[in-house]
Amino acid sequence: MINYCLLALLFLLSVARADPLLVAHRGGTGDAPENTLPAIRAAIANGAEMMWLTVQLSRDGVPVLYRPADLSALTPQSGPVAGRTADELATINAGWRFHDASAHAPADYPYREHAATIPTLREALRLLPATMTVVLDMKALPAVPQARAVARLLDEEGAWGRVLIYSTAADYQAAFAPYPAARVFEARDATRNRLLAMALRGECLPPPAPGSWVAFEYERDVAVVETFTLGQATSALKARLWTPQAVACLRRQGGAKLLAIAVNDAGAYRDSACLGLDAVLVDSPRTMRALRTQGTPACVPAH
């Protein structure tokens, strides 16, 4: 039987420490209005090395960048993205509710005077450096029409080689299966199951194919339900499922590419670097770049 604690220790001692890539979450939602061109420009200026963008379809079938289910979440308008054409969305201010947390005034909404409108995916791809990897987070259902529209756009832009596809909805795994050039993250259910198997049973499930991308939160609210004859009880906790054992398991057959979601403070960044993760999804590239320049404490191998 393989001792995964020993394997994890040997892995951490042998791995060359390198800073994980900074992935700008929704273009850097902490620094500028999410999924907008100003956010993308700011993230690039603040040293982001990968870009994470959220995709939905407009009423006329154009892939656009917007995350919430309703326009009222971020804009002065209301209704679903799918209820407006791309041209109509291009006039709606997605920066309306953005509060600049770095400002001294308690209610500074700089984009109310200088609008940051809802862009198309095509605009974003043309703005981004051709060498930068872009993660497209698919939010809308049904999956097939959106996958078809995104695939057509990636064909036209010659962009398959720099794009990764992610979604919490398993439907997108099947929707992109007909496209040989599509690079799709491992299904979230599979990632969660393998991390829980290691955390709760010490079991290393067969890893994904070498080079596959795997993503999960650095820290996640988890509820454990125990069922009795006369009822049940629940224990809730904030779990860290990225462990040295989990990383060693995933690396053991050539290695998957590992991305931790919601890494937004010095401790989370240090732990991610010490684990040898490939990338971290951050809300504020500006803040994380500052942490990088300060350096991070030395790693202490887990026992």
Image (cartoon, rainbow, N blue to C red):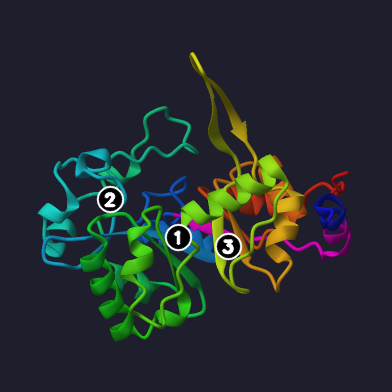
Check if mark 3's residue and mark 1's residue have beta carbons within 8 Å: no
Q: Work out whether residue 175 or residue 102 is closer to the camera in this orientation and state it.
A: 175
From this viewpoint, is residue 293 visible?
A: no
Q: Is residue 131 left or right of residue 143?
A: right
The x, y position of residue 72, in whole percent, is 21, 39
Please name the residue that numbered disc 2 is placed on.
Answer: 114
32 lies above or below 121: above
Q: What span is in magenta? A: 10-25
Residue at image location 28% in from the left, 85% down from the top:
156
Disc 3 crowd rating (10 Å Cα; few below 14, some 14-19, many 20+) is some
Residue found 75% across the figure and 51% down from its top:
245
Q: Determine the residue located farthest toward the top in the rendered image.
A: 230
Residue 11, percent from left and from top: 83, 61
Sequence order check, earlier mark of 3 and 2: 3
Decide if residue 265 is on the left or right side of residue 166.
right
Residue at the front extreme of this rendering? 229
Disc 3 secondary structure class: loop
Q: Secondary structure at mark 1?
A: strand
Q: Residue 208 at x, y = what percent?
A: 59, 67
- Which image quarter is the N terminus in? bottom right
Task: For label 2, count other residues whose C-alpha is less than 10 Å away and answer few (under 14), some (14-19) or many (20+).
Answer: few
**Residue at image coords 52%, 65%:** 50
Residue 209: which disc?
A: none
Does label 2 or label 1 sit earlier along the sequence? Answer: 1
Q: Which mark is residue 47?
A: 3
Q: Which residue is mark 1?
A: 52
> What amino acid is labelled 2 in the image?
His
